[in-house]
Image: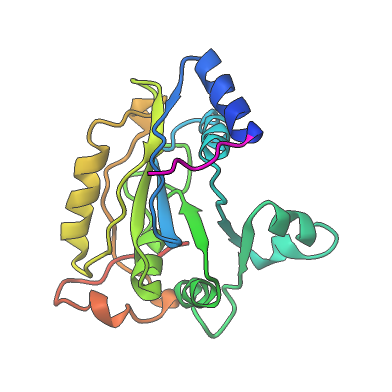
Amino acid sequence: MTQPTTTLRQRIARRLLQLVGWEVDPYIPPPAKYVLIVAPHTSNWDFPYGYLGKMALGLQLHWVGKHTLFRWPYGWLMRWLGGIPVDRRSRNNVIQQLADVFARRERLVIAITPEGTRSYTPNWKSGFYYTALAAKVPLAMGYIDYRRKRMGISEPFLPSGDLEADLEHIRAFYADKIGRYPEKTGEIRILSRPADQGPAPEAARSGRPQEAVHS
């Protein structure tokens, strides 16, 4: 099987990580579209290490931001950096806006930190889950494990609509992944879904209480 060509940029990133004792799992999920969970997120160091990991893997990642960040004169820079604007005032809720973006593109990976902050939070925000469900794309789990100094991405899986069953799968994966500050790592659970995000996707209606959605 032919190995993908490694660019100079990737080799430099891998070398820099090696110099500080880090390894990157070379596996990259095959789907052209997926939502990438990034966890645990407990430190400012997650960004530089994660950015080098992205470079080492040759990934083109996108992130979600409030539409006002994309106004002149910096809008072009936000988009160049991979930003995707969402408007909470729109008649289409944030989840549907992102599902529409997935539908328009042939390739798209959106990275989301469900903890939403590097400080301790008792639960995850659920935008990552309902975005994948509405867009009918897989979820993959990205990690930065400070205990082993290793980072990588899991095999992707399609969310089933059974939120608790899917969260159990996610919990099992992250059980041995340790953030820089373990005491800031919150429980992988999702609270009730707020009304301003609109109705849950049909696939999620399984008789369970609906869960929270945040982008």
Q: Nearer the viewer, residue 22 or 173?
A: 22
Question: As drawn, which residue projects farthest toward the front?
Answer: 1
Quadrant for the N terminus, please.
top left
Residue 147 included in the magenta stretch of the image: no
Residue 42 can be seen in this image: yes
Residue at screen point 22% across, 44% down: 171
Q: How many marks?
A: 0
Residue 106 locus on image (x, y percent):
52, 70
Res. 150 image quadrant: top left
Q: Nearer the viewer, residue 202 or 141?
A: 141
The figure's colour scheme reads rainbow
Residue 144 can be seen in this image: no
Question: As drawn, which residue projects farthest toward the right?
Answer: 73
The secondary structure making up most of the magenta span is loop
Residue 118 locus on image (x, y percent):
47, 37
Residue 6 included in the magenta stretch of the image: yes
Residue at screen point 33% across, 70% down: 133
Residue at screen point 26% across, 52% down: 189
Residue at screen point 24% across, 41% down: 173
The span picked out in magenta is 1-7
Left or right: 77, with 205 as reference point: right
